Image (tube, helix red, strand yellow):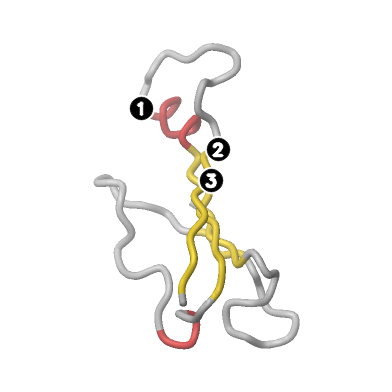
Amino acid sequence: RKLRRLDGTSFDGLEGGAATKAFMTNADGRLEGPALKGPEFRAGAYEWEFEVGDYFVRAGVPTAGQPFLDVVPLRFGID
């Protein structure tokens, strides 16, 4: 799973920092803790990318050449 700030600024607020973070979910499909905390938890527009197509392949679900759902974006904002 990838989380990125849509304004391109870094998560730590510093010049040249990363605007994208990668996460691995557990067997239950959840993160072990919060994705954003401390100084990273700030106002802005964000986008999660869920790699649904890869998940189905790893789970052994038969798929066509082109998956119906592949990478699914979810945009949200924090005020």
Mark 3 vs mark 1: give the one in front. Answer: 3
For disc 1, the marked residue is: 59
In the image, what residue occupies the spot 42% across and 86% down? 38
Q: Amino acid at mark 1?
A: Ala
Which dot marks residue 9?
Answer: none
The residue sitting at the left extreme is 28
Q: Relative to 73, is 48 above or below?
A: below
SS for dot 1: loop
Q: Nearer the viewer, residue 76 or 21?
A: 76
Q: Earlier in the sequence, mark 3 or mark 1?
A: 1
* Mark 3 and mark 2: Cα distance apart in space: 7 Å
In the image, what residue occupies the spot 55% across and 37% down? 71
Q: Nearer the viewer, residue 16 or 27?
A: 16
Q: On the image, which quarter does residue 7 sit in?
A: bottom right
Labels in figure, total: 3
Q: Would residue 65 be found to the left or right of residue 41 on screen?
A: right
SS for dot 2: strand
For disc 2, the marked residue is: 71
Q: Could you say where residue 4 lies in the image, as x and y percent from the top left?
A: 59, 63
Q: Could you say where residue 31 lies in the image, as x and y percent from the top left?
A: 33, 59
The residue sitting at the right extreme is 16
* Mark 3 and mark 1: Cα distance apart in space: 20 Å
Marks 3/2 in contact by CB < 8 Å: the verdict is yes
In the image, what residue occupies the spot 46% across and 72% down? 78
Q: Could you say where residue 15 lies in the image, as x and y percent from the top left?
A: 73, 86
Q: Would residue 14 be found to the left or right of residue 62 on screen?
A: right
Q: Amino acid at mark 2?
A: Val
* Mark 1 and mark 2: Cα distance apart in space: 16 Å
Q: Could you say where residue 22 lies in the image, as x and y percent from the top left?
A: 53, 59
Q: Earlier in the sequence, mark 1 or mark 2?
A: 1
For disc 3, the marked residue is: 73
